[in-house]
Image (spheres, coloured by chain):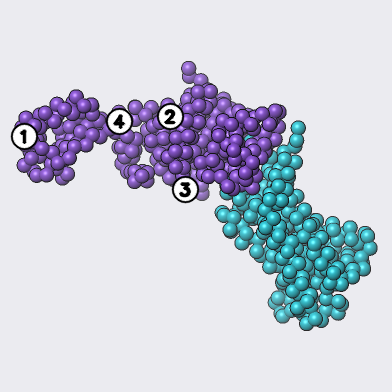
């Protein structure tokens, strides 16, 4: 199926003389999760603002749900739901009242039923009558998303939906997103968490300083950097030399006194590697198995690290 | 079926009902200032009439201005928390979102002025106004609340944080002190006197004073209406363009 929910080509946007988006092209198939990945300041929120009609592009064309965002904003808005970077909930109202507000604005019928279902689905029934100012960060995010779902949007934009959440709330949010996709909703997700894109997205685009530096599935991106390998660290240069003579397919890192041995990381290949070392009476100070993650991808693609590397 | 404006207005009312501190300031501060000036300083000012009669019209204007801080903060927190973006994506019109705030602001003003007048009467306020004069005075107050309300909404939309939004409304609170509200402009020092005479709030206060004395003057009334209209137009245009542009 090649039904496109979102297409953008040559998207450009500048604020004053600062270029924020510099020729972004992307296609999102209906019913999939597309993740725009990038560090703070890469232009993710600006991209979401343009795609959701909140900001006007300076150049390029964007179609969402088959409508041009510049000329058919109303039709686009009718098809989408947007959850911004900060939980846009009304602190002085209760959870139930927040949802009711959305129902009223959608001029929907059967409001009580819709509100009840969403409270149930997002596990907010118990706190429904409490003012949102008493909610935790995770609850606010859930309510925020529930409010966005009131109009049954077919295309959902989530701008950093888990930033600032604890790991547990993050998992909850992920499972909610998966359920939505299972219902056929298209999700456009921005995140600065590489793990999040890896977990959720069918396709990932890496945004760096307003440009897409890579696009593909999580696996495709991982293929663009060295594969899984075992790293052996030795204490002396003599041992390193000896090991390098034995393990001919390894690459040396003299500075770290380490060898990088290609491996699938499985127990069988590890055992045979250890057996070979034993055979020559060699002992490594340290052994570690490296599976490339999206952090490596980002580093390999942009030549600089993301701020999230430190996490 | 409910119109978006009604939904928004109801939301603003709920906010006021649940955040009494915000209107506490709007209602209590003018009363405190009235007590302070009338009791403490009133005898020291020679204004030719009973001081409470002189000061009440100016304090009515002050009461309008004191209500604006809460409006600026409320609008700004809607903006900075992404609530306005949410409404925009839902195709709720700018008119509906902002009108809710303006109407809530004007109604807060009216409550504050009712409280202020209640205290004024307790302090011996004796207006000579007839029914028509009163209606005129209420009309001027509503117009002023509406005009400064739009200006405040623009300030609230444009400010980066709720704190700066609150600060941005301070000049509007200070301006009445540099007008004929508390003492006649003629008694002020050079420079300040000219400023007080020509700043927008003075003709508005003089209009209220005239109406409450039962002696409305056409000249100041026209100036007052012109200032209100001007402030309203500037505020409205600024608010509208900021609402449209800022995401």
Q: Indicate the position of residue A118 as horizontal and vertical percent values.
A: 60, 31
Identity of the residue drawn at 55% across and 42% down: A140
Of marks 1 and 4, the one in the foreground: 1
Q: Is residue A200 above or below residue B216?
A: above
Q: CA distance from mark 1 to mark 4?
A: 36 Å
Return the residue at label 1.
Answer: A281
Task: Say which residue label 2 marks.
Answer: A201
Residue located at (38% from left, 35% from top)? A195
Q: Is residue B116 visible?
A: yes
Chain for disc number 2: A
Q: Disc 3 marks which residue?
A: A18
Where residue B124 appears, x then y in whole percent? 87, 72
Q: CA distance from mark 4 to mark 3?
A: 31 Å
Colour of the chain lettered B: cyan
Q: Residue at x 70, y 75 (%)?
A: B192
* Mark 1 and mark 2: Cα distance apart in space: 46 Å
**Label 3's element?**
strand
Q: Nearer the viewer, mark 3 or mark 1?
A: 1
Q: Which quarter of the rendering shows the C terminus of chain B?
A: top right
Q: Position of residue A147 (x, y in %)?
A: 60, 36
């Amino acid at each position: 199926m090649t039904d496109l929910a979102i297409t953008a080509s040559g998207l450009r946007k500048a604020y004053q003389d600062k270029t924020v988006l510099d020729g972004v092209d992307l296609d999102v198939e209906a019913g999939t999760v597309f993740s725009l990945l990038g560090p703070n300041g890469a232009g993710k929120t600006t991209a979401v603002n343009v795609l959701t009609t909140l900001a006007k592009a300076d150049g390029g064309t964007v179609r969402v749900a088959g409508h041009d965002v510049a000329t058919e904003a109303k039709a686009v808005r009718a098809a989408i739901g947007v959850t911004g970077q900060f939980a846009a909930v009304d602190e002085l109202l209760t959870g139930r009242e927040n949802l009711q507000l959305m129902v009223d604005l959608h001029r929907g019928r059967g409001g009580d039923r819709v509100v009840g279902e969403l409270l149930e689905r997002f596990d907010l029934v118990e706190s429904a009558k409490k003012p949102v100012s008493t909610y935790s960060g995770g609850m606010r995010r859930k309510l925020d998303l529930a409010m966005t779902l009131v109009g049954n949007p077919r295309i959902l934009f989530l701008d950093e939906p888990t930033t600032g959440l604890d790991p547990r709330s993050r998992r909850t949010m992920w499972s909610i997103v998966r359920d939505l996709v299972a219902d056929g909703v298209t999700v456009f997700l921005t995140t600065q968490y590489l793990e999040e894109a890896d977990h959720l997205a069918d396709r990932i685009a890496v945004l760096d300083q307003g440009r897409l530096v890579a696009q593909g599935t999580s696996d495709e991106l991982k293929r663009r950097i060295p594969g899984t390998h075992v790293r052996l660290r030795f204490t002396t240069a003599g041992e390193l030399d000896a090991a390098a003579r034995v393990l001919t397919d390894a690459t040396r890192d003299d500075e770290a006194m380490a060898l990088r041995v290609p491996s699938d990381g499985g127990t069988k290949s590890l055992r045979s590697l250890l057996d070979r070392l034993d055979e020559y009476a060699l002992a490594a100070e340290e052994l570690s198995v490296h599976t490339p993650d999206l952090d490596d991808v980002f580093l390999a693609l942009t030549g600089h690290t993301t701020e999230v590397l430190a996490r | 079926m409910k119109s978006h404006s009604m939904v928004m207005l109801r939301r603003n009312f709920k906010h006021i009902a649940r955040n009494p501190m915000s209107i506490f300031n709007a209602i209590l501060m003018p009363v405190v200032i009235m007590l302070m000036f009338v009791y403490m300083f009133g005898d020291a000012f020679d204004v030719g009439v009973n001081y409470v009669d002189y000061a009440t019209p100016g304090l009515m204007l002050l009461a309008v201005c004191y209500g604006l801080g809460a409006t600026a903060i409320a609008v700004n927190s809607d903006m900075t928390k992404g609530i306005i973006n949410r409404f925009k994506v839902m195709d709720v019109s700018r008119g509906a979102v902002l009108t809710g705030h303006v109407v809530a602001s004007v109604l807060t003003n009216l409550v504050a002025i009712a409280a202020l007048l209640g205290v004024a009467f307790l302090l011996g306020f004796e207006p000579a106004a007839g029914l028509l004069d009163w209606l005129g005075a209420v009309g001027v107050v509503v117009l002023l609340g509406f005009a400064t309300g739009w200006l405040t909404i623009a300030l609230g939309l444009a400010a980066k944080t709720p704190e700066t939004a609150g600060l941005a409304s301070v000049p509007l609170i200070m301006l009445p002190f540099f007008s004929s509200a508390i003492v006649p402009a003629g008694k002020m020092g050079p420079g300040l006197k000219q400023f007080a005479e020509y700043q927008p709030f003075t003709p508005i206060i003089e209009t209220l004073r005239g109406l409450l004395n039962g002696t409305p003057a056409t000249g100041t009334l026209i100036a007052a209406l012109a200032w209100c209209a001007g402030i309203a137009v500037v505020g409205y245009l600024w608010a509208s363009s900021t609402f449209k542009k800022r995401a």
